[in-house]
């Protein structure tokens, strides 16, 4: 299993999303007291640091929509 993300449950508790490296199945487990807080934060901000699309294209699209 590989940690690929985190999410916050209704009660404010964080959970880690794992993906199986063999079959791709996703699972969610609540964080534990001994989990590394810095590592949890790095997993949480990964989509912001490495967006799934080029940011330049987003800027171009926003500019194009502002003109129209």
Image (cartoon, rainbow, N blue to C red):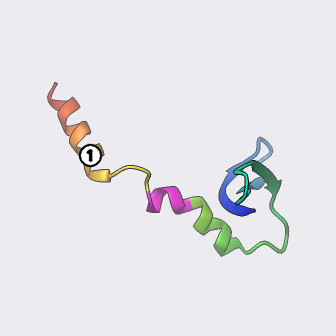
Residue at 25% from the left image edge and 38% from the top image edge: 62
On the image, numbered disc 1 is attached to which residue?
57
Image vertical order of residue 10 relative to residue 44, above or below: above
Q: Is residue 58 left or right of residue 1?
A: left
The quarter of the picture where residue 11 lies is top right
Range of residues picked out in magenta: 45-50
Residue at 65% from the left image edge and 72% from the top image edge: 39
Residue 67, x across and y down, in percent: 14, 30
Name the residue at the top extreme. Answer: 68
Residue at 78% from the left image edge and 72% from the top image edge: 35
Residue 46, x across and y down, in percent: 53, 61
Magenta-drawn stretch contains 41: no
Question: Considering depth in this image, is 49 or 23 the residue closer to the camera?
Answer: 23
Residue 57, x across and y down, in percent: 26, 46
Magenta-drawn stretch contains 48: yes
Quarter of the image where the N terminus is located: bottom right
Question: Considering depth in this image, is 54 or 67 the residue closer to the camera?
Answer: 54
Q: Is residue 40 left or right of residue 9?
A: left
Residue 32, x across and y down, in percent: 84, 66
């Amino acid at each position: 299993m590989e940690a690929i993300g985190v999410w916050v449950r209704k009660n404010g508790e964080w959970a880690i999303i794992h993906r199986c490296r063999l079959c791709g199945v996703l699972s969610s487990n609540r964080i534990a007291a001994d989990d590394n807080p810095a590592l949890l934060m790095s997993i949480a901000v990964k989509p912001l640091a490495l967006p799934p699309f080029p940011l330049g294209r987003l800027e171009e699209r926003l500019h194009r929509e502002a003109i129209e």
